[in-house]
Amino acid sequence: MLTAISRYGARVLPNTEKLVAACKARGEFIQGAQIAEFEDAFARRAGGGIAVTAAYGRMAFYYMLKALDLPRGSEIIFPSLTFWVVPELAKVAGLAVVFADVDPKTFTIDPASVERVITEKTRVIVPTHLYGLSCDMDKVEAIAARHNLVVIEDCAHALGATFKGRAVGTFGSGALFSFQTLKPLNCYGGGAALLQDRALAAKVRAGVDALPWPSEKRVTDRLLMGRLQRIFIKPWVFSISLFPVLWIAAWIDANPDVFLWEKIRSLEPLPESYAERFPNVQATIGLEALKHLDEWTSRARAHAESMNRVLSATPGVQVPVVPSGCSHVYYQYCVYGPERVDRDELVVRCVRRGVDIETLHVDVPPDMELFAGAVAEATGARRASQAIQIPVYSSLTDEQVARVATVVRDVLAESSSRA
Ligand SMILES: *Cc1c(COP(=O)(O)O)cnc(C)c1O
């Protein structure tokens, strides 16, 4: 039987269950010394600063905004291609969100567009190192200095990426990282703020320390959920579970949304599970995962390079652009197909051949009702949302990557000759 290749692959430790059992046995499932240990190890690995863990990456961001103590209605600039929850939490924190465009070549924020949307009310800019590629931090820092803005980097995709040799997350006053199942460092949820300023770090810490601990049941359920996601996206299970749904949909013209997605909704008031602390068992998993991070990153990079070798020789295809001075960790690998080829058609043809590829991993918030009325430039973001995302994640074998590359190349060639 032909196994299907999933669009997602989580980074999973071989000994997760053992680590969990050991925490339970020690009576340190929720509280324990590994939280501080993980924060220190994480900060060192991320390039320096002070790390503060939280229930989500988005909540680390929220507490950083709260710690800045800005006047209500201050403006905060996001790229118009990002995960919708981040600007939504800025709204919950009382700020007015504004969107600057992205460069469709790199998928990261366009400094010229940032300049155009700055007003005298602008206080914060959030460069998102989307898909694992650093923004042009020279330009972002220059703009921030000129207009006296606070920089908070969104590093949810980019742990390990650098700009001119320096780690992303160390440029701004603060940065957020996510430890969700599919992110570069998988702790089955959670996130961290990385802060370069002691006083700001102390305020973020005070915000998080005031929160209650999660219940044991909540954390157990979360680990179980992570385990299910993990099982469901293993190639062989994927081929007998979720994949048939996508496969059938590819023939009957349906459009099932992936079950992993969060419902788009206002987050005011904050859901109960958001205002909790990061538990010891997840910190323990994070500590162990940090030891594997470099190996995982280099595998994803090697896969991306194999994909580049095949696809850059395919007419009409634009493989990921990595500007000089930037390094890419390939959380996602995004290409543009030939102009005249219908993108959805292309995805359907890949699915029929057992390769599940994705069209858009994040959102164009200016086009969502949730952000109606926000000042926005989004032409580049709309163009960027036409790219396709091809699996290169670290748990794929070299043979699987070769198969993905061949399928995508053949489907592209076929589609261009018909277009
Ligand atoms: C995943 C993600 C986050 C934050 O993730 P949490 O689910 O809150 O941990 C932030 N920004 C981007 C771009 C993301 O993809």
Image: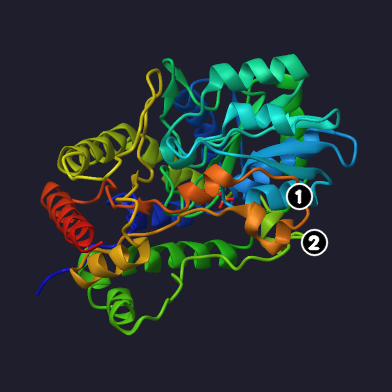
Q: Residue at x 66, y 53 (%)?
A: 366
Residue flagged by tag 1: what amino acid is it? Ala
Above or below for 65 versus 238? above
Q: Residue furthest bottom?
A: 252
Q: Nearer the viewer, mark 2 or mark 1?
A: 1
Percent from the top left, x then y, of residue 16? 35, 53
Of mark 2 and mark 1, the one earlier in the sequence is: 2
Disc 2: which residue: 269
Q: Is residue 84 visible?
A: no
- Quadrant assignment for the C terminus: bottom left
Q: Nearer the viewer, residue 228 or 96?
A: 96
Residue flagged by tag 2: what amino acid is it? Pro
Q: Classify residue 315 by image quadrant.
A: top left
- Mark 1: give few (<14), some (14-19) or many (20+) Cα within 10 Å: some
- SS at circle 1: loop
Q: Residue at x 43, y 23 (%)?
A: 162
- SS at circle 2: loop
Above or below for 204 versus 2? above
Q: Nearer the viewer, residue 149 or 262?
A: 149
Q: Is residue 29 visible?
A: yes
- Label 2 close to label 1 by CB (< 8 Å): no
- Quadrant assignment for the N terminus: bottom left
Percent from the top left, x then y, of residue 278? 60, 48
Percent from the top left, x then y, of residue 255? 42, 76
Q: Residue at x 72, y 61 (%)?
A: 370
Mark 2 residue's CB less than 8 Å from ligand 1: no
Above or below for 350 versus 55? below
Above or below for 247 versus 160? below
Disc 1: which residue: 374
- Mark 2: give few (<14), some (14-19) or many (20+) Cα within 10 Å: few
Q: How many marks?
A: 2
Mark 1 residue's CB less than 8 Å from ligand 1: no
